[in-house]
Image: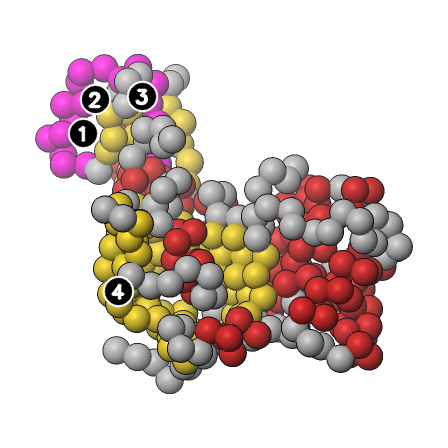
Amino acid sequence: MERANSIIEAKNLSKKFGSFTAVDNVSFQVEKGEFFGLLGPNGAGKTSVIRMMYGFSPLSSGSMKVFGLDIKTGWRDIRSRIGVCQQENTLDPDLSVEKNLIVFAGYYRVPRKEALQRTDELLDFFALNHKRQDQVSQLSGGMVRRLMLARSMINNPSLIILDEPTTGLDPQSRHQVWDKMHDLRSRGMTLVLTTHYMEEAANLCRRLIIMDKGRILVQGGPEELIHRYAGTSVIEVENPGRDLKEFIRQKKIRHEELINRLIVYTDDLDGLGRVIRDRFCPEKCLFRSGTLEDVFLRLTGRELRE
């Protein structure tokens, strides 16, 4: 069912490359002012969805509306109202920080006076004013990502698409970028994020989907998904004995058996946790909160993806 304030409406969306199906009958909505996440392992179909979203890649079947416009026929108008922050550094290395924004504004036919004003505002917002005359090669990784974000906003978009915006950043730089994305969310901006950092998705997104092999596995808020698939608490046991494994199976407790480790998911840390700690692993148990990464690994598996 469509919602009046939906920015994106995807219905039975599919994308094929020859005989390979990259996106398989996917449906979701993104509401105005929402921070929405697309998660999944490599090859899950996230990038294909994103590229269809801003008209870069045609749909094989299904439908997608952005701002109420059909992406197949209204892609020019849609692109003019979207900002895209790509994973790769696509800044012009021959231009200064300031010129990167001004020149990019020209691609959207932003009047020069407005482009200069927007450039000043964005450099101030992303704390890059002191670097405005520097070359891109002189910037740190965190500054490059902030400049990429600034550039994605030069056309004053109604929707920003963030494709793994903090990949490769150190923790300090990543948190600086998160702070700016929090600011954008608080201003009512609609944002769509793809990321491999589960902490990032949990920190930023109000709702998200987890995809694998072209299909949506689950949709919901981070806390809701953690509660549903991982529990509020997790117990990790190294080299668990047979008695513990049998206890877990008899009690039908959610768990995963790895090579030398048992992971137990529970909402009853006081009761179950005490029993396991006292009876089975007084020295080898790790007790922690459930996370979105637990959900992700339970649903998509732990094998390496190439």
Residue at 14% in and 34% down: 251
> Is residue 49 something one can see in this rendering?
yes
Q: How many marks?
A: 4
Q: Amino acid at mark 3?
A: Arg
Q: Which residues are magenta?
A: 234-253
Secondary structure, mark 3, is strand
Q: Earlier in the sequence, mark 1 or mark 4?
A: 4
Q: CA distance from mark 4 to mark 2?
A: 50 Å
Q: Amino acid at mark 2?
A: Leu
Q: Which residue is mark 3?
A: 261
Secondary structure, mark 2, is helix
In the image, residue 234 sits, relative to residue 112, either above or below, namely above
Residue at 80% in and 64% down: 124
Which of 20 and 237 lies nearest the eye of the viewer?
Answer: 20
Question: Which labelled disc corresponds to residue 248?
Answer: 1
Residue at 17% in and 18% down: 243
Look at discs 3 and 1 and give the one toward the viewer.
3
Q: CA distance from mark 3 to mark 4?
A: 43 Å
Q: Which residue is mark 2?
A: 244
> Is residue 54 toward the left or the right of residue 298 in the image?
right
> Is residue 62 toward the left or the right of residue 290 in the image?
left
Secondary structure, mark 1, is helix
Residue 2 in magenta stretch: no
Image-quadrant location for residue 186? bottom right
> Is residue 204 toward the left or the right of residue 27 in the image?
right
Q: Amino acid at mark 1?
A: Ile
Q: Which residue is mark 4?
A: 61
- Residue 295: image location, x then y, percent: 33, 44
> Is residue 152 toward the left or the right of residue 291 in the image?
right
- Check if mark 1's residue and mark 4's residue have beta carbons within 8 Å: no
